[in-house]
Image: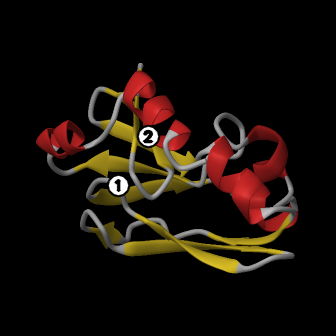
Amino acid sequence: MTIYYSEEHEWVSVEGDIGTIGITDYAQNALGDIVFVEVPEVGSDHDKGDEVAVVESVKAASEIYAPIGGEVIEINESLEFEPAMVNEHAESDAWFYKIKITDLEELDDLMDTKAYKAFIANLD
C-alpha cells in the first residue's frame, strides 16, 4: 500500500487500481470540529480536480476535490452518523470513499509522505 497527498490536503492510499481517499490530519485540524460530511454516490465517475465531497465544521464548509480520477465503488457510511470521526481518525478509519482508479499515471502528480510533510511545514 502506497499513500499519496494532494496540495488540497487529500490523501490517497493505493492498492492495485483501488484508491481510498480522505482528508489529511492537517486539513481536519485547520477545519476544527467537523459536524457534517457529504460523500459522493457509489457509481459516480469523477475526474481529477472535480468537487466530490463536502465537509462542514463549526468554522467553515470546505469542498473536497478528487486527487485522482475514477469511479466511486464504496463510501464510508459511518461518516454520515459520526462526522467527528474525521477529527479523530482523519488518515485512517475516517476515509471518505474508494475508487477504481482510471489512470494510475495521475498519481505521479501527487506527493509522497516526505514531500507532503515538507509542503505543510512551509504553510505554518
2 shown above or below 95? above
Residue identifier under label 1: 67
Q: Position of residue 107 (x, y in %)?
A: 23, 40
The disc, 2 or 1, on the residue closer to the chain's N-terminal end is 1
Residue named by callout 2? 119
In the rendered picture of this protein, how many numbered marks are placed on residues?
2
- Front-most of 40 and 120? 120
Which image quarter is the N terminus in?
top left
Q: Quadrant of residue 104?
A: top left
Quarter holding residue 65: bottom left
* Above-or-below relation of 103 to 43: above
Q: Position of residue 66 (x, y in %)?
A: 37, 62
Give the amino acid at mark 2: Phe
Give the residue drawn at x 40%, y 52%: 7
**Marker disc for residue 85:** none
Name the residue located 42 percent from the left edge and 22 percent from the top edge: 114
Note whether 112 is above or below 9 in the view shown.
above
Instruction: Label 2: state its secondary structure.
Output: helix
Measured as percent of width and height from the top left, residue 87 is found at 81, 50
Q: Nearer the viewer, mark 2 or mark 1?
A: 2
